[in-house]
């Protein structure tokens, strides 16, 4: 066994890889401890590594890597270190165990092999896919080296000279700093010059900076300019779309990006490391969301510009005319701002952006809650919760059919229907949602249609809220009464929790197909449909083209974020209610052994009968075979 204390970069830097490979010929590292401080008499901040080496054996031993934290007490560190030494694998707070042998010369940097970092790296694929940065950006050769090209540099902007951008000109705010007295100027060929849209990355980083890489995007007003060797220039490929560039730019600014690019050591960011850096690229669903976000940001910036311009132009007029102009022209801007502010009110978002049955029930809750505590308000809250679970469970059952997965909880509903005298309850809907949040459905790919619904009861907070409301619903049905005001307040709070967790419903639009016309030559269907989102069922229709004719006129569908349509019949149908004449959504409530299926409205609980649904219910497994 051999113990050594060496500079930390001996174990981490690329330049020391040959030394590490040479050591690996006769020795196997089994323990590395990184620590740093300012030992006397140097008073310089240094990082060292204590390394334990053993002779290689036929059965390689695990490697334990530990990093001493300056923010933790000695007793805690000693306990964590002692536990690490007893482990054959896994991770502690300040260290971890590597079971498999590393290649000779491999860097032993702590962050490079840290399971926590590797897990976060793997999680990037959840955004769509990951690619090496060098596949979508060209890493440009520096236009000017501040030492080797010193003869090209000047202190003033003479004829033909352009500005030289150094690392200090790349600001963390994402902009290029304006020129100052330290700015250098140079006369360089056009092919070395920067272009609009180039990303500039500061190549020298302060070790104490906890943030990510420092990145700025070159704007037209920053040109003409050339980059010095202290700046890495990333030029996006022409195939990249604007929102894809934005995602990469924002990722580079994360601490994870710097950790992956530098292994958490050193002050320099190497171009070769950036080329290999895994960066996320969005799938089509996320791309659509990013495009919408960029569009929203552009629109808000436009409104801001209009407001500033209005104030500036009005103040240049006579006071009386300026006042009238500000009031008149500013009215639309104020209305825009007020409408946007309403979206911060989650209740408004539910009323306007959630599917009609849920939004309609929430409107009744808000109306009843505006008065004194009452059983009418209590019933409105509990019924709204059940409708939310019922609607979401129906979406979950449609999702499961698409995936080819059986939902075991559906058997309970089928058994009730088969008996002919009972229908689904609050507990049945909750059971469906609990099951689709389980391990079996977590295996589904993220691009599986309607897969968002599996997250409804995924968190303990959502499950607890659901259980509390189920208890209140059960107590109410069995005439058990407590403190009305207290129970109403708690039930209302739990309903809000469920609604907040169901915000994915705003992206799954409930639509009613009024008309379907198929063009056999173009292989495209022209649809006339209504989007039933919000608390009102009287909504305008619109036209849409769709690449399939396997659609039912007069049926309800879910339209997902990719504008794909998913049939809801027979789980949910839309009809005019014979009791109140309002257009409503209905689900199967009772299936008597003889006669029509009894339906119940999600909006108001009215019932009706349907002679045509028995066989479709068998087809989807809600009734046993005949």
Image (cartoon, rainbow, N blue to C red):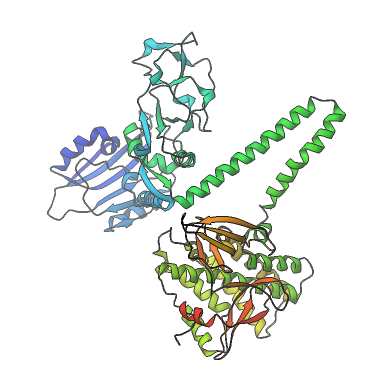
Q: Is residue 616 above or below residue 216?
A: below
Residue 195 image offset from top left, x and y in percent: 45, 25
Q: Is residue 437 above or below residue 293?
A: below
Residue 90 image offset from top left, x and y in percent: 32, 57
**In which image quadrant can residue 231 be found?**
top left
From the viewer's side, name the closer residue of 489 and 297.
297
From the viewer's side, name the closer residue of 540 and 278.
540
**In which image quadrant can residue 277 be found?**
top left
Residue 160 image offset from top left, x and y in percent: 46, 10
From the viewer's side, name the closer residue of 159 and 379.
159
Q: Residue at x 71, y 65 (%)?
A: 363
Q: Residue at x 51, y 62 (%)?
A: 565
Where, quadrant-wise, is the C terminus in this rendering? bottom left
Q: Residue furthest front?
A: 521
Q: Residue furthest top?
A: 159
Left or right: residue 12 versus residue 589 is: left
Left or right: residue 599 versus residue 142 is: right
From the viewer's side, name the closer residue of 44 and 507.
507
Q: Residue furthest right?
A: 320
Residue 550 image offset from top left, x and y in percent: 48, 65
Q: Residue at x 74, y 67 (%)?
A: 369
Is residue 251 at all visible to an observer of this figure? yes
**Numbered disc total:** 0
Left or right: residue 620 versus residue 601 is: left
Is residue 459 at all visible to an observer of this figure? no
Q: Is residue 392 above or below residue 316?
A: below
């Amino acid at each position: 066994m051999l113990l050594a204390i060496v500079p930390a970069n001996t174990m981490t830097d690329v330049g020391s890889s040959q030394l590490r490979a040479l050591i690996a010929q006769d020795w196997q590292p089994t323990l590395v401890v990184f620590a740093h401080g300012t030992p006397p008499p140097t008073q310089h901040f240094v990082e060292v590594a204590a390394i334990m080496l053993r002779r290689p054996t036929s059965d390689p031993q695990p490697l334990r890597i530990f990093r001493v934290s300056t923010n933790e007490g000695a007793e805690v560190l000693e306990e964590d270190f002692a536990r690490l030494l007893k482990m054959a694998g896994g991770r502690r707070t300040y260290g971890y165990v590597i079971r498999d042998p590393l290649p000779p010369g491999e860097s032993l940097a702590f962050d490079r092999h840290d399971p926590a970092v590797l897990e976060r790296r793997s999680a990037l694929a959840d955004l769509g896919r990951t690619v090496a940065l060098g596949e979508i950006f060209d890493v440009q050769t520096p236009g000017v080296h501040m030492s080797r090209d010193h003869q090209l540099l000047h202190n003033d902007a003479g004829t033909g000279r352009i500005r030289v951008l150094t690392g200090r000109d790349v600001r963390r705010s994402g902009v290029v700093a304006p020129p100052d007295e330290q700015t250098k100027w140079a006369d360089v060929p056009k092919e070395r010059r920067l272009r609009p849209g180039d990303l500039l990355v500061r190549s020298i980083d302060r070790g104490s900076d906890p943030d990510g890489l420092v990145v700025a995007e070159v704007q037209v007003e920053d040109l003409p300019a050339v980059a010095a060797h202290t700046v890495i220039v990333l030029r996006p490929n022409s195939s990249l779309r604007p929102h894809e560039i934005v995602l990469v730019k924002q990722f580079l600014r994360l601490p994870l990006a710097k950790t992956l690019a530098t292994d958490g050591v050193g002050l320099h960011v190497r171009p070769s490391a950036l080329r290999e850096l895994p960066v996320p690229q969005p799938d089509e669903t996320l791309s659509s969301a990013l495009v919408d976000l960029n569009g929203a940001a552009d629109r808000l910036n436009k409104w801001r510009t209009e407001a500033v311009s209005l104030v500036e132009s009005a103040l240049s007029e006579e006071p009386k005319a300026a006042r009238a102009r500000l009031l008149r022209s500013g009215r639309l801007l104020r209305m825009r701002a007020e409408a946007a502010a309403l979206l911060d009110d989650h209740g408004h978002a539910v009323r306007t952006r959630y599917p009609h049955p849920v939004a309609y029930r929430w409107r009744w809750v808000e109306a009843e809650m505006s008065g004194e505590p009452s059983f009418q308000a209590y019933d409105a809250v509990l019924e709204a919760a059940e409708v939310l679970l019922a609607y979401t469970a129906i979406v979950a059952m449609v999702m499961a059919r698409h995936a080819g997965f059986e939902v075991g909880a559906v058997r309970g509903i089928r058994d009730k229907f088969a008996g002919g005298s009972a229908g689904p309850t609050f507990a049945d809907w909750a059971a469906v949602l609990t099951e689709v949040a389980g391990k079996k459905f977590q295996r589904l790919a993220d691009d599986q249609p309607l897969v968002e619904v599996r997250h409804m009861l995924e968190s303990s907070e959502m499950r607890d809220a659901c259980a509390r409301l189920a208890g209140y619903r059960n107590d109410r049905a069995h005439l058990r009464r407590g403190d009305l005001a207290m129970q109403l307040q708690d039930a209302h709070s739990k309903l809000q929790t469920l609604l907040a967790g169901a915000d994915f419903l705003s992206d799954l639009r409930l639509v009613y197909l009024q008309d379907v016309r198929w063009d056999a030559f173009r292989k495209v269907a022209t649809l006339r449909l209504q989007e039933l989102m919000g608390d009102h069922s009287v909504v305008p229709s619109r036209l849409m083209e769709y690449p399939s004719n396997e659609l039912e006129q007069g049926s309800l569908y879910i339209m997902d974020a990719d504008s794909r349509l998913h049939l809801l019949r027979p789980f949910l149908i839309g009809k005019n209610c014979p009791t109140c004449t309002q257009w409503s959504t209905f689900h199967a409530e009772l299936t008597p052994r003889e006669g029509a299926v009894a339906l119940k409205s999600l909006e108001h609980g009215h019932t009706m009968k349907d002679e045509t649904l028995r066989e479709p219910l068998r087809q989807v497994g809600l009734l046993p075979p005949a």
